[in-house]
Amino acid sequence: MSQLQRTNVLHHSSTMATPKEYYDSLPPVAKTYATICLATTGAYQLGLYNLGTIALFYNDVFKSFQIWRLITNFFFLGPFSLPFAFHLLIILRYGVSLERGPFEKRTADYVWMFFFGALSLLAMAVIPFLWSPFMGASLVFMIVYVWSRELPNTRINIQGLVELKGFYLPWAMLALDLLFGNPLMPDLLGIGVGHLYYFLTVLHPLAGGNNYLKTPIWVHKLVMYWGKGYQMNSPVQRDPAAGVAFRGRGRLVGTTTSSTTRDSREGETNTSTPQNGGAFRGRGRRLDGH
């Protein structure tokens, strides 16, 4: 029941004529992650593999050199169920919203956010109290937290009864888990990693400090080789014969795009941007790191 309540936060009405058109319209990073997670669960339901072969067990990683566990554990969000649907909808709504909004034309930066989140969660999992065999739920909740900081003034409507600013969405979800007795650790880890990423890439540079989390060159090269997405002012020269629309990192300073415009691109009908004042105003501020 609690997951059903939380899923209702994520109402999404698509203007696409068919599911295929909707799927084709999704930006590459969120679409790829959602597709892999869906395929991983589908293969499990069909009995094509055992969960023990993809779970995060550090003894197997270091003693048997089963390195794939460091990656595959992030792709299993549970069997087909309401919790699985809830996490998938987070990727398809808030992950897509981030990629089309604050990370627009910054595909490599968005990929690096996922890499940083996964690496941070793997480091935390070394502590037995924080370990989990599958840490995909925490990575997904990181998306929620970063979205709430980048788009803090977007209005969220919960079942038509409660309306709150996007800034408070992670805490509302955390409160629902607490109320219904669901595990809090995945959410808390996601919040912690998400805040660390936002602090290092936005808050600390805005306070006059260095950006210690600039997107590495190898991520730019990886995205260029992938051939998906778009990035302005790339530090990596592209091959004109490859036809890759990858061009480098963009600048995001101030509030240049309204959340209403972003929501209209997504076809969302349950969010809006307030016109008057408030503690938080529109998208987050982000300095260029190059």
Image (tube, rainbow, N blue to C red):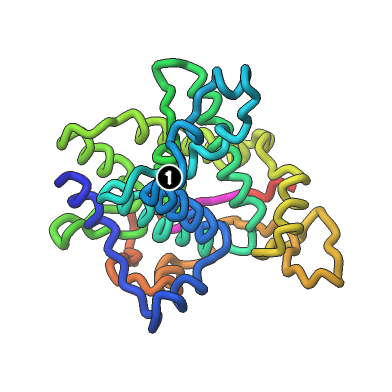
Q: Is residue 38 left or right of residue 183?
A: right
Tell me the chief SS of the magenta region: loop
State whether residue 52 is above or below residue 145: above
**Residue 127, position as x, y percentages in the image:** 47, 16
Measuring 29% from the left and 31% from the top, which residue is drawn there? 184
Q: Position of residue 236 (x, y in %)?
A: 82, 55
Q: Nearer the viewer, residue 180 or 149?
A: 180
Q: Nearer the viewer, residue 133 or 257?
A: 133
Q: Is residue 134 left or right of residue 100?
A: left
Q: Which residues are magenta?
A: 282-286
Question: To which quarter of the image does residue 118 belong?
Answer: top right
- Asked if residue 225 is positioned above or below residue 182 in the image, the reply reads below
Residue at the spot of label 1: 140
Q: Residue at x 51, y 61 (%)?
A: 31
Answer above or below: position of 192 versus 35: above
Q: How many numbered discs?
A: 1
- Position above or below: 32 against 127: below
Q: Is residue 108 at least partly visible in the picture?
A: yes
Which residue appears at 34% of the width and 52% of the height? 166
Looking at the image, the residue that sits furthest to the front is 47
Identity, as a three-letter code, of the amino acid under mark 1: Val
Q: Is residue 270 left or right of residue 193?
A: left
Residue 58 is drawn in which quadrant?
top right
